[in-house]
Image (tube, rainbow, N blue to C red):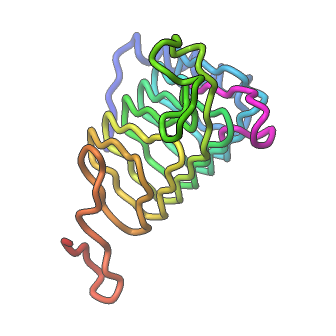
Amino acid sequence: MKNSYGLGEILSNIISLVYTKVFYKGARFIRRPIYVRGKRYLTYGKGFSTGYGCRLEMFDTGKGSLEKILIGENCKIGDYVHIAAGEKVTIGSNCLLASKIFITDISHGNYTDFDMNSTPDIAPDQRPLQTSKVSIGKNVWIGENVTILPGVNIGDGVVIGANAVVNKNIPANSIAVGCPAKVVKIFNKDENKWMKL
């Protein structure tokens, strides 16, 4: 696919390319503006690229390692993608993320167990932070406007359809769509094709 840019876009891309080479060594192309909070907790592989307006936030919650967001090689992230990590969000190599995606391993409050600190009487930003790791395998394609919630594991070779809300694990080599996301197809390696469930 060949892109055709106007003069303003060409100048903007030149500035972004210089910015990438100076501040994101090894990355392919980081478009500005980009918002990175807690950059010391970010690890990315060679060939990493982002679209406009991305927001990568890493919080020192006392959980997990010093690597909060780990992105594999040759990952391409579209415009306005927001990733928030308090424990760990891992994205495998060769993943493609469309625009306006939200991925988080963190939540304000605990709503699965009885917790006096997460009642409706308490302001949400005063409720204790809860974290649960998120893992996305390699060769994954995530469509426009997808939300991936804490504790989710997505296997290798998965396709997540546009506007899906992923709140549970998705097995490798499958296609999941909907809100909440459900697997609708699995890749059959014997027949070398996608099969409906």
> Does the magenta-highlighted stretch encompass residue 61?
yes
Out of 172 and 125, give the one closest to the viewer: 125
Q: Which residues are magenta?
A: 56-69
> Does the magenta-highlighted stretch encompass residue 51?
no
Out of 190 and 146, give the one closest to the viewer: 146
Image point (72%, 23%), residue name:
38
The relative height of residue 7 versus residue 18 in the rendered view (above or below) is: above
Image point (57%, 55%), residue name:
93
The relative height of residue 165 versus residue 13 in the rendered view (above or below) is: below
Return the x and y of residue 28 as percentages of the image width and height. 60, 38
Give the main secondary structure of the magenta stretch. loop
Return the x and y of residue 56 as percentages of the image width and height. 59, 27
Image point (48%, 64%), residue name:
156
Return the x and y of residue 130 as percentages of the image width and height. 61, 34
Residue positioned most to the bottom: 190
Image point (53%, 40%), residue name:
113
Return the x and y of residue 84 as percentages of the image width and height. 57, 30
The relative height of residue 45 versus residue 84 in the rendered view (above or below) is: below
Number of numbered discs overlaid on the protein picture: 0
Q: Quick one: quadrant of the C terminus?
A: bottom left
Out of 16 and 10, give the one closest to the viewer: 16
Q: Quick one: quadrant of the N terminus?
A: top left
The relative height of residue 108 versus residue 74 in the rendered view (above or below) is: above
